[in-house]
Image (cartoon, rainbow, N blue to C red):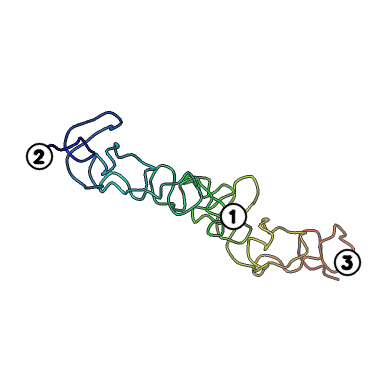
Amino acid sequence: TCRLPRCGDGVIQAGEACDDGNGLNTDACLSTCQVAACGDGVVQVGVEECDDGNQINVDGCLNSCAVARCGDGVLQDGLEACDDGNNDESDACRNNCQVAACGDGVLQQGAEQCDDGNLVNTDTCLSNCRDASCGDGIVHAGVEACDDGNNNNGDACLTTCDQARC
């Protein structure tokens, strides 16, 4: 019997990039006689984490055939608030892909003087992430006797945050 050339016969014919003679899609040659590559919709075990066969980079599988994750530099809509792809915890995007904010406990260089992660105004860091100081209008326990937030030494609280004595 005479057999016509076809994909999967083990012989590379015109129009075929490869032909390994099997119907497996998990090796270097697909059952369509095309070379396996990222974006073909077939996961190559040990080479690709995923392969969804599309050019959409904001879904669960990146165009590089890596699974999308926080820190990959690609913003996943609805899952991440930001993703700058670096490990710098002190910039505008935290390493957990949340936007940095006053009160998150991480000092944002150039934007905050302090960030102790709480909303307590009587400690050394105010809830607006500014350093506590005499004259800010807030009494800091154990440090100041008073703080009326003005520069008037003629009232009950001196500019040194000590109480005036009569």
Check disc 3 and report its element: helix, strand or loop.
Answer: loop
109 sits to left or right of 145: left
Of residues 97 and 6, the one nearer the viewer is 6
Circles 2 and 1 in contact, beta carbons < 8 Å:
no
Name the residue beneath numbered marker 1.
99
Circles 1 and 3 in contact, beta carbons < 8 Å:
no
Labelled disc at residue 1: 2
Select label 1 or label 3 by which is in front: 1
Check disc 2 and report its element: helix, strand or loop.
Answer: loop
Please name the amino acid that badge 1 sits on. Answer: Val
Q: Quadrant of residue 136?
A: bottom right
Of residues 92 and 19, the one nearer the viewer is 19
Disc 3 to disc 2, how far (Cα)? Answer: 113 Å
In which quadrant will I find the C terminus?
A: bottom right
Of residues 149 and 83, the one nearer the viewer is 83
Residue 93 versus residue 104 in the image, above or below? above
Check disc 1 and report its element: helix, strand or loop.
Answer: loop
Q: Position of residue 113 (x, y in %)?
A: 64, 51
Q: Residues within 10 Å of mark 1 (few under 14, many from 20)?
A: some
Disc 1 to disc 3, how far (Cα)? Answer: 43 Å
Select label 2 or label 1 by which is in front: 2
Please name the amino acid that badge 2 sits on. Answer: Thr
